[in-house]
Image: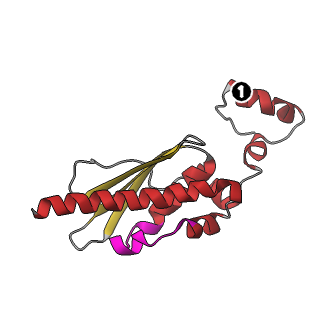
Amino acid sequence: MAAYNLSNKVYTKIRPLISAGMDVRYALTRNYHEKVIDHYENPRNVGSFDKSDTNVGTGLVGAPACGDVMKLQIKVDENGKITDARFKTFGCGSAIASSSLATEWIKGKSVNEAHSIKNQDIAKELCLPPVKLHCSMLAEDAIKAAINDYNTKKDKNKN
């Protein structure tokens, strides 16, 4: 069985399952689609850029109801193409997966193309249940916030 670093609260809840011989990974992931689990266990593009870089846009969004916080950054070339993206997310598996997928999708797109990505597309790709749709909404909001930040910096540099 794989080793997991679990808080006492989580361990207390799943200890009966472990005692019954249930795989811990199954107990922790049974309500998530395999695409969410993949992005959660193998997140893509985790990290950050220097937010003072004029070619970097930073979006920081949160959902007070559930406590998820998402920072998504884009790096844009002189032609308006997103050459790289990074994220850091504090939240549930669906929030992390939504961030990870969003960074994959926006890399290589123009700023305008990335701006058109909708939360419904992210939710559909990850097979998110209705109760987790707010995670895909956060990802869409983070993309838009990063683009807005980049555009603000770009406009300041023109003047």
Numbered range of the magenta stretch = 105-119
Q: Residue at x 40, y 69 (%)?
A: 115
The verdict on residue 39 being magenta is no
Residue 32 relative to residue 83: left or right: right
- On the image, numbered disc 1 is attached to which residue? 9
Q: Position of residue 17 (x, y in %)?
A: 85, 36
Q: Residue at x 78, y 43 (%)?
A: 27
Give above or below for 100 relative to 6. Answer: below
Q: Position of residue 155 (x, y in %)?
A: 18, 63
Q: Residue at x 45, y 49 (%)?
A: 61
Q: Residues within 10 Å of mark 1 (few under 14, many from 20)?
A: few
In the rendered image, which quarter is residue 25 located in?
top right
Residue 139 relative to residue 50: left or right: right
Q: Position of residue 6 (x, y in %)?
A: 67, 31
Q: How is the image coloured?
A: secondary structure
Q: Residue at x 59, y 43 (%)?
A: 65
> How many marks can you see?
1
Which part of the image, by quadrant, shows the N terminus? Answer: top right
Kind of residue indicated by mark 1 = Lys
Q: Residue furthest top?
A: 8
Q: Position of residue 24 (x, y in %)?
A: 76, 40
